Amino acid sequence: MRQIKSEFQHLKLKRIVGVLLSVFLLLPFNLLLAQNVQEVKGTVTDSKGSPAVGVTVAVKGGSPLTVTNDAGAFTVRVPQNTTLTFSSVNFEPTEWKVVPGQSANLTLKERLTQLNDVVVVGYGRSSRKNLSMPLVRLKQKI
């Protein structure tokens, strides 16, 4: 009985030492990775100084990270020496190089385009009680 208790304590001690060793070996690696990532905050405005809402913020050549809020503000965590791209339907795409300790306060140029055509498509029939939007009937006069 004494021998089983001693072996159990030995295994328990080995497990604790193994976990502690793993933590201490991985901790410096995580700290090295954390030093290469920084938090970037900023605001995006239009040419009139109004907040640019819904602008997509992404790493250049990568997937979107976030979009600007109602105040045109954003916060992202990215690697150092990264280039961020800012794009929206109403604005010209803009790139900004991340500088450690510097916030990204950008003014985007508005895209001057107009829609040339309006296309209306309608299919099928429905009764008024099944509609959840306004119904307009157009009559053609010849």
Image: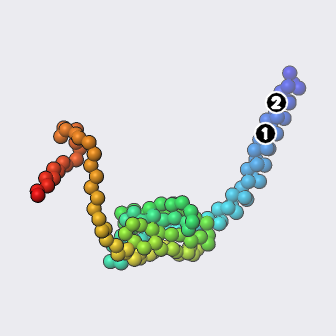
Q: Which mark is residue 8?
A: 2
Q: Amino acid at mark 2?
A: Phe
* Residue drawn 14% across the image and 55% down it: 140
Q: Is residue 73 visible?
A: no
Using the image, determine if residue 25 lies above or below residue 5: below
Q: Quadrant of the C terminus?
A: bottom left
* Residue drawn 32% across the image and 77% down it: 48
* Residue drawn 37% across the image and 74% down it: 111
Q: Which mark is residue 105?
A: none
The residues tagged by marks 2 and 1 sit, at their Cα atoms, a distance apart of 11 Å
* Residue drawn 78% across the image and 39% down it: 15
Compared across the picture, whether 98 is left or right of 125 comes to right
Please name whichever residue, 96 or 23, is drawn nearer the observer in this view of the structure: 96
Please name whichever residue, 108 or 20, is drawn nearer the observer in this view of the structure: 108
Mark earlier in primary sequence (2, 1): 2
**Viewer-nearest of discs 2 and 1:** 1
Residue 6 is situated, as x and y percent measured from the top left of the image, at: 86, 30
* SS at badge 2: helix
Q: Is residue 9 visible?
A: yes
Compared across the picture, whether 59 is left or right of 10 comes to left
Using the image, determine if residue 121 lies above or below residue 82: above
Q: Amino acid at mark 1?
A: Arg
Mark 2 residue crowding within 10 angstroms, few (<14) / some (14–19) / many (20+): few
Residue 141 is situated, as x and y percent measured from the top left of the image, at: 11, 56
Q: Which mark is residue 15?
A: 1
